[in-house]
Every structure is written in structure tokens, then in C-alpha cells.
Image: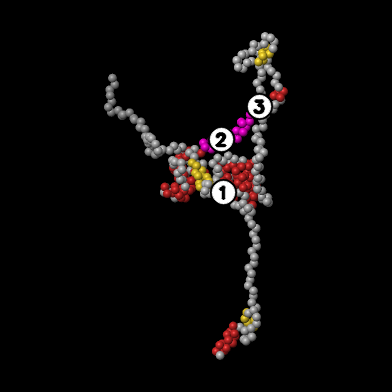
Amino acid sequence: MAEQQLSAPPRARFLVRRSASGVTSVSEYQPAQYTIIGHHLSQHHDLSLTAIGLGTHILSLPDGSPVDILTLAEKFPEGRAKIAAALRELEAHGYIERVRERTPQGQFITRTFSYNFPEATRARREREAQAARLAPLRAVPSLQKSPKPKTSDSPSGTSSRTDASTGAAPDADPDPAPVPASDANTAVDVDPTPQPHPDRVPPPPLPQPAAPAPERTRTAAALLATLRRDDDRLLLSERDVHRLAPAVAAWLERGATPDAVRRTLATGLPPDLRHPAALLAHRLTALLPPPLPADQPAEPAQRPPVVPLQNCDGCDRAFRAPSPGCCRDCREANEAPAVAA
């Protein structure tokens, strides 16, 4: 038996050290009063902390709660400028949507829509739009051939059909009946393009500039191509940009600034926008501003008539008067003796 060595060094112990930095979550059960927030919002890399906190607060509110800038500024210590900037960030990334609506009383109100998962909402709308486009094609009835009558050879040599009510089968294999010529020559290819309704009024033509200006047309095309920065639903194809660019150039020709055109096209979009090019074409046509009036030359100011110079009959001094006579000093001198008398 080995002798125990009391002076031997003890076995080294491996200690697990926890990092002093980082977060440690302490979770407690919440039976009620909680809100589910996705990591796409709480860990968003392009949103500021003010916008993330404001988006979380808006998601926790019940429907109908006011979320305007004045109400939020009274709740939180951030000023109106920070809250307005945070709302613009949330609107740019699709977490909220502000739509101006007109009430039956004629007043304008702002309705705010809050989205807890904008990407899923956008994908669902695209699926619904695609299903709506395919609905007319699915509604076209497919031409089917009529069922072939089944015949069988009876013992007496005559042909008899199968009784559908009793389900009796023929004695021998049925012979295929010839297909009628009308069914054989029927075309089964259906044109999927929906035909325009005869009573539908065609849309008015897009406005065109009076004089060609390549620089103005390039500015209009750049404005249309960058509308998706204001709202990602305004993503236009290259063909739509070339088709709508002359209409925007007509606006610029009539004195509208690019910022004014952008606000008119990208503000107050409907929540279920499906055809952005059609909406922009309607706004460019229906809201076309009138041309600026031509600058009229200003009328020259009328100068007062010039009073001619006259020589005084008494002192021969020059003075201005409409007719010859005496100056003021001579008239006063002539009037003084008459008053004294």
C-alpha cells in the first residue's frame, strides 16, 4: 500500500468564470399586461433608440389611442422635434402608416396604422394582389367534352345503354362512341387577357410638355425612380418611369418644383395600394396645376405736369406759375396797403 504524501500539492481545480460584461436576462412570468415585440423592431440596425422605443409604445396601445406629436410630447420628456423624427423613421421602415382622411363633416383627420411585422404584411398584400389578378382567369369556365355514351351488345343483337339509376353494367366491353364534329373542332385555348368593358370610359391621356426639354425630362425620370425612398410601395419599373416622365416634365414646365411634385405623388397613399403606376398617372393627370400667368410689363408711373417758369411783373424774379403775374412776395406787398386803408 502506497504511503500517503501529505506534502504533495493539491489537484488543480478548473473554475468557470463568467464575463463581467454583457446582459443577463431575469425573466418573470407575466399573467397579463404584456406586448409581444419582434426582434426585427427591438434589434433594428437602422432605427434610432427613440424610434424603437416609440414603436414599442405604439404597439402596446389599444386601438383608438391618440399617437399624434402633441399627445406623445406630453407623455414623454423628448421634445416634439425628436418625436416627429422618430415617427418619420417608423413610417419610412413600414412600422406605421399615416393616412389623411376626410370626414363626412368636411374635416381632415390623420389615421395611423401600426404594423407589428411590416414584412409579413407586405408579403400578404402581394399574395392578395396576385390572387386578385388571377381571379378573372380562374373564373373562365373550361370547355369540357361531353361524356361518351356507353353501349353494349345485347343478346338480341341491339345496343342498349347502361342504366344510371340501377348501375347495371353491360355484358361486353363498351364501344367508344364517335365524337361529334362540333366538339372535335371546338378550340379549347382561352385568351387569358381580360377584355375591356364596353361601358368603361378610357382614362384621359397623360399631360405632355409643350416644348421638349431633355434636362427637364431627365429630372422627371430621376424623381420617379427615387419615389421608393419615400415609400417602398412606389417601386416603378423602367417602362413606367419612361411612360410617366413626360407628365412630370409638364408639371415642371408649369413652374412646379421637384419637392412639390414629390409631395403630391407620395403623400396620402391608400393602405391597400396595388397599382402604384396607375395611381401616379391619375394624380399627374387630375392634379395638373395651371400654367403660370405671363409677366405683364409694369405701366410707367405718370409724372405730374411741369409748371412753367414765369417772370414776376413787379421784381422780374423767376417763379413757377401756370400763368404770368406777380410772385408771392409782390402779391403780399400789394395787398398790405389795401388792408391798412
> Which residue is the site of mark 2?
128
Do the residues bearing badges 2 and 1 touch, measured as CB atoms within 8 Å?
no
Task: Name the quadrant of the N terminus.
Answer: top left
Q: Which residues are magenta?
A: 119-142
Nearer the N terminus, badge 3 or badge 2? 2
In magenta stretch: residue 255: no
Element on which disc 2 rests: helix
Would you place residue 177 above or below residue 291 in this image? above
> Which residue is the site of mark 3?
143
Kind of residue indicated by mark 1:
Arg
Residue 9: image quadrant is top left
Compared across the picture, whether 79 is left or right of 133 comes to left
Give the number of the disc on residue 146.
Answer: none
Q: Residue furthest top?
A: 155
Q: Residue at x 64, y 52 (%)?
A: 253
- In the rendered image, residue 51, in percent from the top left (x then y), is placed at 46, 44
Which of the two residues, 17 or 61, is positioned nearer the viewer here?
61
Compared across the picture, whether 84 is left or right of 316 comes to left
- Look at discs 3 and 1 and give the one toward the viewer: 3
Kind of residue indicated by mark 3:
Leu
The answer to whether one can see residue 82 in this image is no
Element on which disc 1 rests: helix
